[in-house]
Image (cartoon, helix red, strand yellow):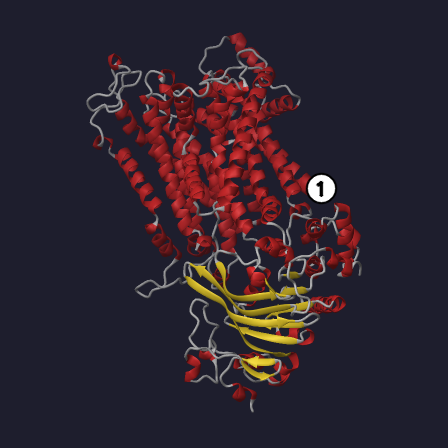
């Protein structure tokens, strides 16, 4: 178990450095005029140029630049956005909002996916099952650029059931519609995995043994089948958390929620290079950490993995 | 061994049980599976009896219906697609097939228990062995968690698992094949059942381990005076342990006899062919005997005697319905063949 | 989007060689592909999605079949006007014919989707084959590389890469295509790799090797045909995903730009005016949704037909 942990940590570190290097390289490598690329298409003065050159070590070789950047990142210095604000402060403002949104979305998605998935598996081939299969297929396919604006239009504006936008201090109810939209991006796959897992476990040999032990159907399903079936689902939910936080870009833009995604999007539009790289690096870290936690969770849930 | 009598006295599992009636009496059982490709007749009139302390071996090839019979007795058939369409399963006089499920559940593990072939897949991989054993005590007897664990350790001791106290918290995959099978046996015997059905308990094990497990089963059975139904396709395993043998083919018992009689003088062509197909040292250099052909698809069982396409003794009457009845050969022997005399060689 | 989860749940039937199946009416044994086609033919979903895909492809190839209007001929005087004449969907905030723009938008979506998927397919095929066949250190390196690529959340990586690749005067088509291709090959590679590993250990490969077949011949003639089925399924679904991704990137302003016509751009442009004029939002959304749905349904149907476990 310990060895597995160490191996995973090493893998994570390697992936982190690899991924951030790729992002950094994409933003800054081999440019004819790196400073111009940094600021996008805005014109800048000579003194600004000199300052930027110094700050970003642009006179040094590329690997050295990356090294300085990494050093900064690891000591918590995310740099300064071209708007002048400290990126760290911007993150501190934006992060809680995104976390709330993603948190709500994950809970909604998990509740729907697990309940509907279990019911579908128990009554495979029935009406409920067929309806959910079709619904998940449609949901799976519709991209968020379609779902979010249409949901906002129909439920927020035309029907007026929900608030069409949420602001900086969005309340729980204001976040409901965006949370549902965000949840819809992951609920379909989670439901299908739950359904497949439960269906497979219902046919397992240990179910026969449990019935031969005279246990009630409720216990056989609720204790024996569920515990086995939920392992892949829970790990999928964990992975989805990481994905949701980065995928919230479109949702936050549509519903005007100034979270991490929204700021990132604005940074792209104003061509704020440092901000983009800074935010993306943080998102990568979060993504990787969440994946690591999910892997460890898998070991906790499934004793067979624990003793490798 | 602790508390045998008081455990049994504790519960009145089923009303109407008659202690003088035969322990288990299966009478003309019929089971079919309704599938997309047709109706598979898995069991077509299986009948046998079991007395306390007795070991009955059900012998037959894969697909002959022996496991399905066992599952029907336990009431754990997959329905759908499996349906019991006829016959009776009498436990001490009470027909289990007509007993409501809620009461039937109480009989399972309490009075009639079952162990399965592959212990690794038959045990739940995510719960400890102690949990799975303790469950029986907690759900059937209402014992506390602590007491259940104590009894679980005791059980593991009885099946001779070393270091039971620490192994009780281990998971199934941490045991070797033989040890796992012992755990399954412990689970089956936890509530002191009167009948134990063992469905191919040693097929997945090495030969040496096989002998150990069979020895353990025999010892435990003797201690508790249980009835044991041993389901297998391995004639060698059966010879040491069984008192009587029922040979099944295509869902029917084609011959039933005490063990020495079957090995010495089989009365049914199928039994005879099975015995002759066992390789022996003195056959060295000669071609092995095989039973030509294949067992019939259960959706398409031949008319008359199901064995007739492969039988050396078959004549016209064998190919027509009705199938051969059970001809009584001796007080405890019968065989379903029109030509038992010929087969016996009298 | 959760689409990658769907994709990664695809099983690789892998090393099952094309064995003789139940013979058909002519008495010849059928191959796995033949069996799959028969299953597909009976599947209603397959036909529905195939028809939809065909219509969209037609729209992309010959938009003039569907509309005679010019999508770029916009007049501000017509801004936000309702449906009239051949402009079935009305006019958008610039006075462009929404119907025409929607029809013409199919072309970019299909072009980007197809080429991005082709690129991803080629890279994935090579990487997956190499990693699976040669194994050991090559596999280790390639797998670590895949890990790194998967460490970058898709949308973020796409935004950064697309922005980097497109110059200020591009329409962005090449940039987006390359971006999606370069970021999308990982799932295909993984599926290919496991299928190759499963095939590699089969007896028929060992037999061929003993008869003197070199690695390339082994890979192309023996291993590839048996591993290709699940890979093709991944590609079909990836096509749907790429179409959706292009729209997303265009919506965010990092995809197609300039005067390129794209459903994503249309949806984005329609945003501020949606209260009074929902048409320009709704129609491209519907077309986009149905197109992606059609491709994914197609991929689903193909996968179900090839899945040995469902037999």
Q: In this view, does B231 lie above or below A87?
A: below
Residue C244 image offset from top left, x and y in percent = 40, 32
Residue at the image position 48 percent from the left and 43 percent from the top = A120
Residue C269 shows up from this direction: yes
Residue nearest the viewer, comparing B232 with B149: B149
**Residue B216 lies in what quarter of the image?**
bottom right
Horizontal side of C290 relative to A115 (left or right) equals left
Q: In this view, does B203 lie above or below A291?
A: below
Residue B230 image offset from top left, x and y in percent = 64, 69
Q: Is residue C230 above or below residue C22?
A: above
Residue C122 shows up from this direction: no
Secondary structure beneath disc 1?
helix
Q: In which quarter of the image is the C terminus of chain C?
A: bottom left
Q: Mark 1 points at which residue?
A: A2
Residue at the image position 50 percent from the left and 30 percent from the top = A183
Residue nearest the viewer, comparing B234 with A214: A214
Residue at the image position 48 percent from the left and 24 percent from the top = A178
Residue C263 image offset from top left, x and y in percent = 35, 27
């Amino acid at each position: 178990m310990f060895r597995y942990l160490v191996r995973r940590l090493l893998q994570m570190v390697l992936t982190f450095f690899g991924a951030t290097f790729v992002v950094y390289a994409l933003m800054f490598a081999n440019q004819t005029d790196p400073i111009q690329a940094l600021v996008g298409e805005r014109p800048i003065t000579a003194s600004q140029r000199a300052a930027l050159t110094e700050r970003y070590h642009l006179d040094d070789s590329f690997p050295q630049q990356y090294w300085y950047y990494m050093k900064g990142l690891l000591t918590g210095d995310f740099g300064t956005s071209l708007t002048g604000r400290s990126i760290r402060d911007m993150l501190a403002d934006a992060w809680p909002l995104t976390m709330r949104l993603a948190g709500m979305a994950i809970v909604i998605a998990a509740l729907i996916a697990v309940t509907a998935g279990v019911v579908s598996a128990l009554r495979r081939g029935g009406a409920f099952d067929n309806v959910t299969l079709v619904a998940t297929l449609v949901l799976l396919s519709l991209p968020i650029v379609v779902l979010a604006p249409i949901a906002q239009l129909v439920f927020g504006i035309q029907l007026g059931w929900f608030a069409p936008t949420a602001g900086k201090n969005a309340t729980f109810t204001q976040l409901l519609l965006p949370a549902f939209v965000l949840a819809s991006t992951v609920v379909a796959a989670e439901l299908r995995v739950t359904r497949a897992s439960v269906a497979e476990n219902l046919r397992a040999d240990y179910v026969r043994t449990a019935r031969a032990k005279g246990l009630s159907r409720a216990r056989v399903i609720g204790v024996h089948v569920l515990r086995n079936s939920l392992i892949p689902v829970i790990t999928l939910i964990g992975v989805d958390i990481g994905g949701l936080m980065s995928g919230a870009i479109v949702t936050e833009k549509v519903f005007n929620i100034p979270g991490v995604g929204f700021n990132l999007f604005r940074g792209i539009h104003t061509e704020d290079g440092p901000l983009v790289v800074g935010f993306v690096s943080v998102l990568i870290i979060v993504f990787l950490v969440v994946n690591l936690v999910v892997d460890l969770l898998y070991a906790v849930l499934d004793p067979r993995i624990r003793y490798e | 061994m602790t508390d045998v009598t008081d455990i049994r006295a504790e519960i009145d599992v089923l009303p109407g049980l008659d202690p003088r009636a035969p322990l288990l009496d299966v009478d003309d059982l019929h089971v079919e599976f309704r599938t997309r490709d047709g109706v598979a007749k898995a069991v077509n009139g299986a009948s046998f009896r079991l007395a306390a302390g007795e070991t009955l071996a059900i012998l037959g090839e894969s697909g002959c219906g022996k496991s399905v019979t066992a599952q029907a007795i336990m009431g754990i058939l997959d329905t759908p697609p499996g349906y019991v369409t006829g016959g009776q399963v009498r436990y001490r006089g009470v027909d289990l097939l007509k007993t409501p499920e809620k009461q039937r559940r109480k009989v399972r593990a309490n009075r009639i228990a079952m162990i399965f072939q592959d212990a690794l897949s038959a045990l739940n991989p995510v719960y400890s062995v102690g949990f799975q054993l303790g469950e029986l005590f907690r759900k059937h007897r209402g014992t506390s968690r602590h007491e259940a664990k104590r009894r679980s350790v005791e059980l593991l001791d009885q099946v001779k698992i070393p270091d039971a106290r620490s192994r009780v918290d281990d998971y199934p995959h941490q045991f070797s094949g033989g040890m796992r099978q012992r755990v399954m046996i412990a689970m089956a015997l936890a509530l002191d059942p009167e009948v134990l059905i063992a469905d191919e308990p040693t097929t997945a094990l090495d030969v040496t381990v096989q002998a150990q497990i069979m020895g353990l089963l025999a010892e435990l059975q003797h201690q508790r005076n249980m009835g044991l139904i041993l389901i297998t396709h391995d004639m060698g395993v059966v010879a040491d342990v069984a008192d009587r043998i029922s040979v099944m083919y295509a869902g029917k018992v084609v011959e039933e006899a005490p063990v020495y009689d079957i090995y010495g003088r089989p009365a049914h062509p199928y039994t005879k062919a099975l015995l002759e197909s066992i390789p022996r040292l003195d056959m060295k250099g000669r071609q092995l005997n095989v039973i030509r052909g294949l067992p019939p698809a259960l959706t398409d069982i031949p008319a008359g005697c199901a064995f007739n396409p492969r039988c050396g003794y078959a004549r016209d009457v064998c190919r027509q319905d009705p199938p051969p009845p059970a001809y009584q050969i001796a007080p405890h022997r019968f065989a379903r063949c029109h030509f038992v005399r010929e087969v016996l060689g009298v | 989007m959760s689409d990658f989860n769907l994709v990664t749940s695809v099983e690789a039937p892998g090393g099952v060689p094309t064995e003789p199946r139940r013979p058909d009416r002519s008495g010849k044994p059928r191959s796995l592909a033949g069996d799959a086609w028969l299953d597909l033919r009976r599947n209603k979903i397959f036909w529905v999605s195939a028809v939809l895909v065909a219509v969209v492809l037609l729209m992309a190839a010959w938009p003039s079949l569907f509309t005679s209007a010019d999508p770029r001929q916009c007049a501000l005087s017509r801004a936000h006007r309702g449906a009239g004449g051949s402009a079935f969907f009305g006019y958008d905030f610039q006075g462009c014919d929404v119907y025409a723009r929607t029809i013409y938008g199919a072309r970019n979506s299909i072009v980007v989707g197809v080429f991005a998927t082709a690129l991803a397919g080629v890279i994935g095929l090579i990487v997956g084959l190499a990693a699976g066949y040669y194994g050991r250190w090559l596999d280790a390196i390639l797998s670590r590389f895949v890990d790194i690529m998967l460490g970058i959340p898709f949308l973020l990586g796409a935004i950064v890469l697309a922005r980097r690749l497109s110059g200020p005067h591009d329409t962005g088509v090449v940039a987006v295509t390359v971006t999606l291709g370069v970021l999308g090959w990982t799932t295909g590679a993984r599926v290919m790799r496991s299928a190759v590993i499963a095939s590699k250990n089969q007896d028929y490969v060992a037999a061929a090797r003993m008869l003197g077949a070199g690695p390339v011949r082994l890979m192309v003639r023996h291993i590839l045909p048996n591993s290709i089925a699940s890979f093709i399924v991944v590609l079909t679904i990836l096509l749907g995903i790429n179409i959706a991704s292009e729209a997303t990137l265009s919506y965010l302003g990092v995809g197609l730009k300039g005067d390129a016509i794209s459903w994503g751009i249309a949806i984005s442009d329609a945003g501020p005016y949606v209260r009074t004029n929902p048409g320009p939002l709704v129609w491209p959304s519907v077309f986009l949704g149905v197109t992606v749905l059609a491709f994914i349904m197609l991929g689903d149907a193909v996968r179900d037909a090839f899945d040995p476990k469902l037999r």
